[in-house]
Image: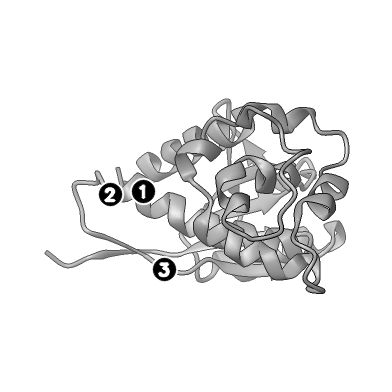
């Protein structure tokens, strides 16, 4: 059976989204398509980092190569992107499904186990339950307090967390679970599931 290719695209607003989310998106898509009646080859997430003023241009750029687009904390402009009740939107020119990730900054903090594997991490400010990350007023501050003090910049940990965070733990965060459900709907619409 010839594998069907699935190329995700991400419109990101910053380094955390680009490094962490790009990896998590591909990992989650592999998990979702594992039960597909087709053999699905999920490729690495193509990422465009931009400000809100370039979102539509970034979507057009990615839509030419990607089957499914994700946006990080982006407000939609009415008239340019059409919405549906299930949260999945379609880019009007290419009809590529677009799923919003919403505000994802706290997702990095959902799995204390992944941080415990990094010697020197301070787990004291991480919530006891993954779903409680949504209550963190300043995820950036908690993240800065959590990372090991090795002289590395904060961004150096984003890829590690993306590759190693437990997706089952992350799924206990309501916003993440909603995103997975919307992504599953988009994959069904595309015939992958």
Residue 182, above or below 155: above
Residue 87, above or below 73: above
Looking at this view, is 12 or 53 the one in front?
A: 12
Q: Is residue 170 visible?
A: yes
Quarter assignment of residue 64: bottom right
Tell me which label, 1 or 3, sits earlier in the chain. Answer: 1
Q: CA distance from mark 1 to mark 3?
A: 13 Å
For label 2, the residue is 34
Whether the residues at callouts 2 and 1 have beta carbons within 8 Å, the answer is yes
Q: Position of residue 42 (x, y in %)?
A: 38, 63
Q: CA distance from mark 2 to mark 1?
A: 5 Å
Looking at this view, is 94 or 45 the one in front?
A: 45
Whether the residues at callouts 1 and 3 have beta carbons within 8 Å, the answer is no
- Element under label 1? helix
Q: Name the outermost residue toward the left.
A: 1
Q: On the rendered image, what quadrant is the N terminus found in?
A: bottom left
Residue 4, above or below 136: below
For label 1, the residue is 31
For image coordinates 78% across by 40% down, the residue present is 78
For label 3, the residue is 43
Q: On the rendered image, what quadrant is the C terminus found in?
A: top left
């Amino acid at each position: 059976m010839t594998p069907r290719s699935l190329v995700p695209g991400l419109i990101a607003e910053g380094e955390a989204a680009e490094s962490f989310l790009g990896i998590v998106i591909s990992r989650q898509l592999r998990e979702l398509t594992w039960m597909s009646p087709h053999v699905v080859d999920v490729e690495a997430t193509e990422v465009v980092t931009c400000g809100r003023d370039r979102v539509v241009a970034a979507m057009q750029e990615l839509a030419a190569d990607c089957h499914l687009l994700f946006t990080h904390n982006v407000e939609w402009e009415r008239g340019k992107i059409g919405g549906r009740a299930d949260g999945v939107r379609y880019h009007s020119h290419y009809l590529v499904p677009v799923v919003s990730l919403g505000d994802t900054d706290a997702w990095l903090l959902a799995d204390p186990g992944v941080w415990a594997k990094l010697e020197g991490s301070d787990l004291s400010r991480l919530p006891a339950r993954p779903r409680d990350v949504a209550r963190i007023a300043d995820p950036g501050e908690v993240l800065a307090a959590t990372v090991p003090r090795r002289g590395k910049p904060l961004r150096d940990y984003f890829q590690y967390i993306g590759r190693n965070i437990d997706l089952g733990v992350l799924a206990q965060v309501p916003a993440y679970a909603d995103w997975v459900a919307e992504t599953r709907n988009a994959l069904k619409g595309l015939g992958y599931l």
